Image (cartoon, helix red, strand yellow):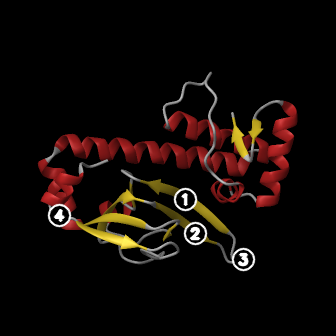
Amino acid sequence: MIDEKILVEYGAVELKLEKGAFLFHEKERAAHYFQVKTGKIKMFNLNAEGKLFTQGMFEAGESFGEPPLFTDSNYPACTEAEEPSCLFKLPKAKFFKLLKENPEIHFQITRMLATRLLYKSMQLKEISSFKPEHRILSLIDYLKKEEGIPADQKYEVSLTRQHIADLTGLRVETVIRSVKTLQKEGSLDIRGHKIVR
């Protein structure tokens, strides 16, 4: 999202995380802007029964955890490295200075946050209203759109069945069953172990 040279110019430092390492926990005070340089970060919540719900997956060039910076509040979720990762870490005050001095970057951040807000609204509607098959197709269609792939072009989903379950609030067994149903209906294909739509 933000050019790496600009981040470093404003005081960002690189932070390395091993696979499985936590960056921050739910209810911890938000104090930094984070952007992935390499690797993959998962943001998630656990309910009282220990069921994991993934809020998002963030890869190279993507940032995360910004909303509580703007509201001066705590993180609403935990983050964990899905694989060895390197992040840029910029203190909140320096992040705000960067935004004030670079309105085009501020606009990009605002647009990205609006896109995520729309996705969260869609996600809540899906979880509360629709069958598992519909939730899965909606997630795949959203990912396809985010990657800029035309609707008439095939898209290979890089997520595992577990990741799909975590992102849709379903059990992995339900995802497996639903994917087979969708394959039989012709709504998607399975190539190797990958879902294609």
Which residue was labeled with disc 2?
A: 45
Q: Nearer the viewer, residue 67 or 144?
A: 144
Q: Earlier in the sequence, mark 3 or mark 4?
A: 3
Report the residue marked by disc 3. Answer: 49
Tell me if label 3 and label 2 are in contact, CB under 8 Å. no
Q: Are marks 3 and 4 in contact (CB under 8 Å)?
A: no
Q: CA separation, marks 3 and 2?
A: 11 Å
Q: Quadrant of residue 67?
A: bottom left
Name which quarter of the figure residue 154 lies in: top right
- Label 4: which residue? 94
Residue nearest the viewer, comparing 144 with 127? 144
- Going by the numbered disc 2, the residue's amino acid type is Asn
Q: Are marks 2 and 1 in contact (CB under 8 Å)?
A: yes
Mark 4 element type: helix
**Crowd class of label 2 (few under 14; some 14 to 19; many from 20; radius 10 Å):** some
Determine whether, in the image, residue 191 is placed left or right of residue 38: right
Q: Kindly report the distance in space between the C-alpha atoms of the residues bearing marks 2 and 1.
A: 7 Å
Instruction: Determine the secondary structure under disc 2.
Output: strand
Image vertical order of residue 114 relative to residue 92, above or below? above
Q: Amino acid at mark 1?
A: Gln
Tell me which label, 1 or 4, sits earlier in the chain.
1
Residue at (74, 39) in percent of width and height? 191
Q: Where does label 1 land, which residue?
A: 55
Instruction: Name the residue: 38% across, 44% down.
Output: 112
Query: Tag 4: residue type?
Result: Lys
Q: CA distance from mark 3 to mark 1?
A: 17 Å
Q: Position of residue 42 (x, y in %)?
A: 52, 63
Choose the circle earlier in sequence order: 4 or 2: 2
Give the distance between the C-alpha atoms of the residues marked 3 and 4, in whole angstroms: 39 Å
The quadrant the C terminus occupies is top right
